[in-house]
Amino acid sequence: MTTATSVDSGGIFGWLDRAHTVAKPGFSRWLVPPAALCVHLCIGQVYAFSVFNLPMTKLIGITESAPDDWKLTQLGWIFSLAIVFLGLAAAFTGTWLDRVGPRRAMFTAALCFGGGFLISALGVHLHQLWLIYLGYGVLGGCGLGLGYISPVKTLITWFPDRPGMATGLAIMGFGGGAMIASPLSVLLMQYFATPTDKGVAATFVTLGIIYLVFMMIGAVLVRVPPNGWMPEGYVPPAQPKKLVTTAHVHVDEALRTKQFYLLWGVLCLNVTAGIGVLSQASAMSQEMFPGQITAAAAAGFVGLLSIFNMVGRFFWASTSDYIGRRNTYMIFFALGVVLYALVPWTGRIDSVVLFVACYAVILSMYGGGFSTIPAYLRDIFGTRYVGAIHGRLLTAWSAAGVFGPVLVNYIREYQLNHGVAKADAYSVTMYIMAGLLFVGFILNWLMTPVHEKHHMTDEELKASMEA
Amino acid sequence: MSETTHHETVSGANKIKLVLAWTLVGVPLLWGIFNTLAKAALLFQ
């Protein structure tokens, strides 16, 4: 144990130190995925935040919006702020996380995310929107970013034989979190609502406490393996694959490689296309199949897509352990081009089944893009700084979160302004998205191993481990 | 789920922890999936 660690180990928070999280003999590595899921299932709530939007426009008027009630446009900023701060926190705290270990990071994420809800509850109670921006948007967003990347490196280290499956399990939780949060939030608001109160503040307090406790359980459960640990029976391949390195690249050095920017582009384009069509899924299904898909059925369609999004995260990341990361992304982009181009045709032949099938596979690959990227980073840059590098790469997600919906909305508006029928306005959008995926295919195809000059020397690696 | 560290078998306490931990995350997730599937069923009616 180094001096620095010894200093960290003191005080009431000593149990959070990396030194206290090293697994003892008899520990099962299969306890780490549920620890990660405890965090990801909670922070996945962010995708269900929209269930609060409508009630929050009637906090004063209760049955109808009063003049002093908040507008939907003002409330939309809460989600946007949270996503922006997710990206910023992931980018800027990766190196710190690498140093302090997963438990302290999960603990901090729990305080930020749970605390964000509590501050937001106060904001609702006092009807001060800035408190919600600060609470859920800024503080909660930081919790999202920290929580998202905190278990990734730990899982990769525990599962050197199946890193894709391990990170896929955790990131699947992020996809599944909204499925729990959405009905739970509705139930809680119904429970707390009175004739003079929408029940939003009490729901925020309850959710904040539930998420705080659940994420803390994850922090308590998580363990890091002892140095040099390997799963029983696992022998690292004598002849590593071309795109799987056994060396390590420092996080700052990774930013000087073309591979980082290729992967940034790969993630950004995959997410841009996915978010773009996801944001239009409900309206698109109803306008392409008028009379066949009703508003209620469209809501069911979006629900179905969220399941494929979640399952895809586990399926594709696990598959990548067998077929390789680059090949997995090749499938995402090649199959994506075909499916995006097929969607307008399903409208022309009036086939709801084919339309739903195309969308389901597209959304599974959208989720798969998120869950396969940590293992791809591990293959290219090694395990030492994979958490920090992953954090910086997630800025691609933030960029795509803005770029995707804006692109889709502007294209659609342009089409409608030029007299294109509503149902046909989606065709151009889908073809442009297919074009983006083709660019992604090229970027992924250009992927090569990182040049040796970027690798850490043995001395540098030893020094970084000691620090 | 019979993985080992340092070539030692998983302890009994950890086996119980395993069941509890997977139940803790599995039950809410299954509840969420069930709710979503119930909503998605409207698409096929």
Image: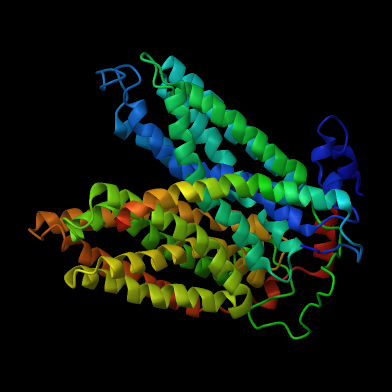
Side of A242 relative to A308 (left or right): right
Q: Is the residue A439 above or below the residue A185 in the image? A: below
Q: Is the residue A72 above or below the residue A268 in the image? A: above
Which image quadrant is residue A57 in? top left
Q: Is the residue A287 above or below the residue A182 in the image? A: below
x, y percentage for residue A29? 78, 58
x, y percentage for residue A193? 42, 21
Residue lying furthest left: A419
Side of A380 relative to A306 (left or right): right
Towards the viewer: A184 or A387: A184
Residue in the picture at 44% in, 42% down: A48
Which image quadrant is residue A6 in? top right
Side of A261 relative to A100 (left or right): left
Residue in the picture at 30% in, 34% down: A73
Q: Can residue A156 be seen from the camera position used here?
A: yes
x, y percentage for residue B7? 91, 66
Q: Can residue A95 be seen from the camera position used here?
A: no
x, y percentage for residue A320? 59, 73
Towards the viewer: B34 or A334: B34
